[in-house]
Image: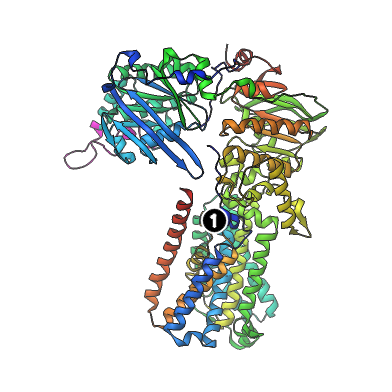
Amino acid sequence: MPVSDAFDSSFEKSISQEDRTAADGVGGEANGMNSSSDLLEMKEIEKSFPGVKALQGVSFKVRRGEVHGLVGENGAGKSTLMKILSGAYQADGGEIWLEGERIEAPSPSDMINRGVAVIYQEFAQAEHLSVAENLFMNRMPRTALGRIDWRRLRSDATKAMERLGFQIDPDLPINRLSVAQRQLVEIARAISREAKLIVLDEPSAVLGDSELHTLFAIIHRLRQEGVAFIYISHRLKEVFELCQSATVLRDGKWIATRAVEDWTTDTLIGSMVGRSISDYFPPRNPSPGEEVLHVEGLTREGIIRDISFTLRKGEILGICGLAGAGRSEVLRAIMGADELDSGSVRVHGKTTRISSPRDAIGLHIGFAPEDRKTEGLFLGQSVRFNVTISRLKRFLSFGRLKLAEERKAVEQHVQRLRVKTPHIATPVGNLSGGNQQKCVIAKQLNAECDVLLIDEPTRGVDVGARREIYELMIELVETRGMAVLMVSSELPEIIGMCDRILVMREGEITAELPRNASEEEIMNYATFH
Amino acid sequence: MASIETSDTKSGRRAGLRLPKAAGLVWVLVGLCVVAAFLSPAFLNPINLTNVLRQVALFGIVSVGMTFVILTKGIDLSVGSILGVCAVTAALLIGLDLPIFIVFVLTLVAGTLMGAINGIGVAFGRVPAFIMTLGMMVMGRGLALTLANGQPISLGSRTKDFMWLGRGDFAGLPVPVWVFIAISAIAIYVLRYTPYGRQIYAVGSNAEAARLSGINVRFVTFSVYVVSGFLASLTALIFVSRLTVGEPTAGEGIELEAIAIAVIGGTSLFGGEGGVVGTIIGAAILAVLANIMNLVGVSPFTQQIVKGAIIVIAVLYEMWSKRRSKT
C-alpha cells in the first residue's frame, strides 16, 4: 500500500506515546450512543502469515452512519484487517459481528450479500463494458424472455447515480471515465447492492482537490442514510475533516480508538509511529566530493521537462514532490529504462549515452526501483541469485561461473548488510520488506555501483528496520564514497536524510533546497499557488 | 510486512543451483521400474530396456529445448512441425546425393531458422508465445506436407550411409542415447555455470526486473526458441535415420510429450523454476510408463488418455505444493 504522501502532516514535532493508553472504547459514549448502534464489531482478530504475526488481537467497532478513519503506517495491518472483513482472508482467531450477528468464516460473496463493500485503489471493473453494465454486473434486469432489459438497465443505472447526486452517461465504456468518476461508480454499485458499510482504501491517493470534495459530499449524504464508512488514508487532514472517530494500528496491534475531537495531529502521528521522529534519522556529516553524475535538460514529452542537476560523491540528493510529479521517471530516465526525447547525462565527467539499464549498470549506476516486488527482485529466486544477477561477470573465468566464489561474495554482503535470512538459498520473497531492500542494495554493491538511484527506500519496510536502511545508506556515502539520489514521498525522510533537496511539480524541478528545509517550504514548491 | 524468517532450506533449487525435486522424482522412477518388472518379466529384457532408453533419448532431446523455453515462461508448440519439416528436408537432401555432413548441417540450419522465426515473433514482435508457435506449428506441418508432396520420402540406396545415427550402437548404447547424454550435459552446464543460464531463469521469473538488472531480455527470449528449433531438427535427423524414411507427419504430437516431460520433471509453466536434470528423469518416467502400458497391452488410445491426465495432474501438483508453501 503506497504512502501516497504524508505532506499534510507535521512530523517534525517530537511526540510522546503515553496517550495511547488514554484510548477507551470507540468513543461511542462521547457521541451519546450506546453499543446497539454498532454496525460492525471485530473482536480480538488474529492473523499470521509464515513467520509474521500480521494482526494480534485487534478489536475494532464501527457505528451506523459514522465515518471511521483507519490509520497506521505501511505494514501496520490495515489492509490485512480489511481483507479479513471482506472475506478475502480468513482470520486465525477472533470474531466478526455484523448487526449483532456473529459471522463465521465468511466468503467474499457472503460479505457482499451482508452489505459490506470494499473499494480498493485498483478497481475491479470490466474495462470495456459500459457504466450501466458495471453497475449491475451479475444482476442485470431481464425481460420476460430472459434477455437483458437494456432500457431498464439504463434507467436503473441513472437512478443509482442520481441517488448519490452525480450523473454519468450510463452507456459510456468504463475505461473512458476518469479515476474519480470510476470511484463514484464503484460507490454507486455498492449502494445499489444495499451496502451498509463501505471501506474506502486510500481514495484520495488518486483524486484531485475538487474531486475529493465531491467524494466527501457523497459520503456525507450517504451517512445521513445510515451508511457507515471505514476510511483508510495517509492524509491525516482528511481524517480530521471527514471522520467521526479514528483507530490507529501499529505493527499489527490495536493502539487506540478515539473520537476525532480527541485526537490531535501530534497524538495521531505519535500513535502511528510509536516513537519520536528525531530518533529516526542517524546523524550525518556530509562532505561532498567531485561530481559523479550530471544530467542536463532531461525531457520526456508530457512526463518530465528540462531536468538538470549535479550529484556529487559522498552526497545524498533527494527528489520530492506530489505523486505524479515525475520523480520516479527522472530515475528511470537516468537508468535508460524509459526512452528520452532529449537531454544528456554525464558520468564522471564524460558525456555518455544510456539507452538501456544495461548501459547504466555498465557505468556503475545502480537502481533500486519503487516497487521491489514487480521491478526490483526475483521473488521466487534465492537471495544469492538476486544479489549477483546484474553482474555475474565478476565470477566468470573462462566462461564458467565460479560458484564457490559467488557464494562467498554473497555471504559477505549478507553479513555486512546484516540481512536476516536463514540461508543465502532462501527465496528472497520469504524475507521481510527491510531485508528485501537490503538485498536490493547488496545487488548494487555486487555490481560495484558508485551511484545509487533509490526510489522510496523504505516503502514496505518495518518501522524498526527503517533506521537500519537509513544507516546503511549513510554508510554507503560516507565510508564507500558512493553518491545517492533518492526519491521519497515521505517528507520527514527527505528532510532527515538528504544533503540537498530537489522539489518537483508537474514534471519540472521547481526548487533546490538545502538540508533541513522545512516541510512548509517544500510543500510550497510542490503544490500550486 | 513484518519480518519473515522461515527456514526453507530446500529452496536452493530455484536458482538451478541444486537438483530440482530430483530426489523425489528418482524414487517415482524406481517405483515405476519395480512395478514394470513385476507386471511383465519382459521389461528387464536388455532389448526392451535399450528400446526404452532410445525412447528417452528421442523425446528427451526435444524436451531439453522445451525446458529452456518454459524456463523463460514461454512455450513452443511448433517442435513437432519443425521436426516434420526437418525430416522431409533431410530425406530430400539425401536424395540429392549431397554428402551426409552437408545434409546434417543444412537440416540443422533449417530447424534453427524456424526456431529463430519463433524467437523473432515472440521477443521482438511481442506475439504471445502460445500464438506464435501455434501458427508455426500449423505452417510447419503444411510446409512439410508440401515439400514431401504428402508422401513419405524413402532414402533409397543411401539408407546405409545414414543408418548409424538412429540405429547404431556405440560402447553398448544406442547412438541417440549418446547424443542425448551430450546435449543434456551441455544444457546442464549452460544453466548452471554460465551467466546466460542465470539470465534464462531471471527472464522467466520477472522479465521487468531482468531488464532493470541489465539483462538483454529480448535476446534471451529469442535465443531459447532458437535452441528449441535446433534440438527439434537434431531429433529429426535421428528420426529419419531410424525409420529410413522422411515422413512429413513425423513428430506429430511430440510438443505435448515434451511439455509433459518438462512439467513432470519439475519445470514450472510459470517460468523461472526447474531444470534439465528433472527433464531427464521426466523423460525416463514417461518412457517407462509407456513401455509398461505397451507390455501389458493397453491400447494406444487409452495411453493417450493417461498421458493427457498426467500433464494435468503434474500441473495440479505444482499448484498445490506452491499454495501449501505459501500459507
Main SS category, magenta section: loop
In which quadrant of the rendered view does residue A311 lie?
A: top right
In which quadrant of the rendered view does residue B87 lie?
A: bottom right
User: For the point 58% across and 18% down, which residue is it?
Assistant: A11
- Where residue A422 appears, as percent x and y from the top left, is 61, 48
| Residue A373 within the magenta-colored segment of the rendering | no
A352, A473: nearer the viewer: A473
Using the image, determine if residue A246 lies above or below residue B106. Answer: above
Looking at the image, residue A144 sits to the left or right of residue B220; the answer is: left
* In the image, farthest residue toward the left: A144
Q: Can residue B67 be seen in this snapshot?
A: yes
The residue type indicated by label 1 comes to Gly
A116, B159: nearer the viewer: A116
Give the number of marks.
Answer: 1
Give the crowd class for mark 1: few <14, some 14-19, many >=20 residues within 10 Å.
many
| Quadrant of the frame with the C terminus of chain A | top right
A275, B302: nearer the viewer: A275
Q: Which residue does the numbered mark 1 point to in the structure image?
A: B74
B15, A11: nearer the viewer: A11
Q: Provide the residue span drawn in magenta.
A: A128-152
User: For the point 49% across and 56% down, which residue is it?
Assistant: B130
- Where residue B255 appears, as percent x and y from the top left, is 50, 66
Q: Can residue B143 be seen in this snapshot?
A: no
| Residue A145 within the magenta-colored segment of the rendering | yes
Looking at the image, residue B8 sits to the left or right of residue A417; the answer is: left
In what element is the residue under mark 1? Answer: loop
Question: Disc 1: which chain?
Answer: B
User: For the point 33% across and 18% down, which residue is it?
Assistant: A28
- Where residue B73 appears, as percent x and y from the top left, is 54, 54
- Where residue A212 appears, as percent x and y from the top left, is 44, 19
